[in-house]
Image (cartoon, helix red, strand yellow):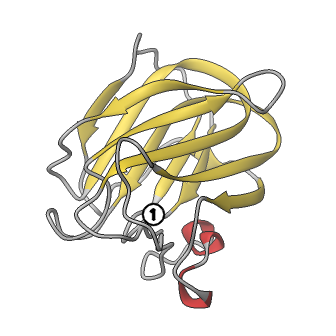
Amino acid sequence: MKTNCLFVFVSLCVILIMTSGGVFAGGRVENIARHWKPEGRRPLAIARVAASSDAGAQYVASHAVDGDRGSRWVARVAPSEAAPQWITLDLLIPQEVTAVAFFGGTPGNDGLQDGQVQVAGSNGDQFSAVATIREAKSAGWLATFDPVKTSAVRVLVKRSPSLYLTR
């Protein structure tokens, strides 16, 4: 059985949102290799991508989901706990989601160090965390969590060694 997945890249990063039968209460984050592939999963359709900021035409949010791991979204404002940066992926239709894979640049140079994977509630405007990333040391990670039906997924970046995210 194929499951659903969504590819998004953030700061030399790819975010892959997917559905599968895996269940991990409270969220689980593990390192993955840059060449990791989502066996038995299929891409989810993305209707719209929005971000807190971008660093110009070369680094717009849509680059996070264009399928090119060489392109990226770059935020023009450094993320912090008080002023996190974010990228939101609105799904074409509500889908059950169970995981997000993120592929970044060289650890300590690009990507996400601290943040959250969040999903939209039933009204679509309030987000809740399904996984928390702390002190990410790998260029790639996979966050898995209990299945949740949602219309949007947001990656909230609270700390990054650089100012940009990629796909």
Q: Nearer the viewer, residue 147 or 75?
A: 75
Q: Nearer the viewer, residue 52 or 166?
A: 52
Q: Which residue is mark 1?
A: 10
Q: Is residue 66 left or right of residue 86?
A: right
Q: Is residue 139 left or right of residue 1?
A: left
Q: Is residue 23 above or below residue 76?
A: above
Q: Is residue 82 above or below residue 97?
A: below
Quadrant including the N terminus:
top right
Give how far across and how far down residue 101 sits, in percent.
42, 47
Q: Nearer the viewer, residue 100 or 114?
A: 114
Q: Which residue corresponds to the image point at 53% horizontal and 81% vertical from the top-left? A: 59
Number of numbered discs present? 1
Give how far across and how far down residue 105 sits, in percent.
26, 70
Q: Secondary structure at mark 1?
A: loop
Give how far across and how far down residue 123 sits, in percent.
84, 25
Q: Which residue corresponds to the image point at 44% horizontal and 48% vertical from the top-left? A: 84
Q: Is residue 58 above or below residue 100?
A: below
Amino acid type, label 1: Val
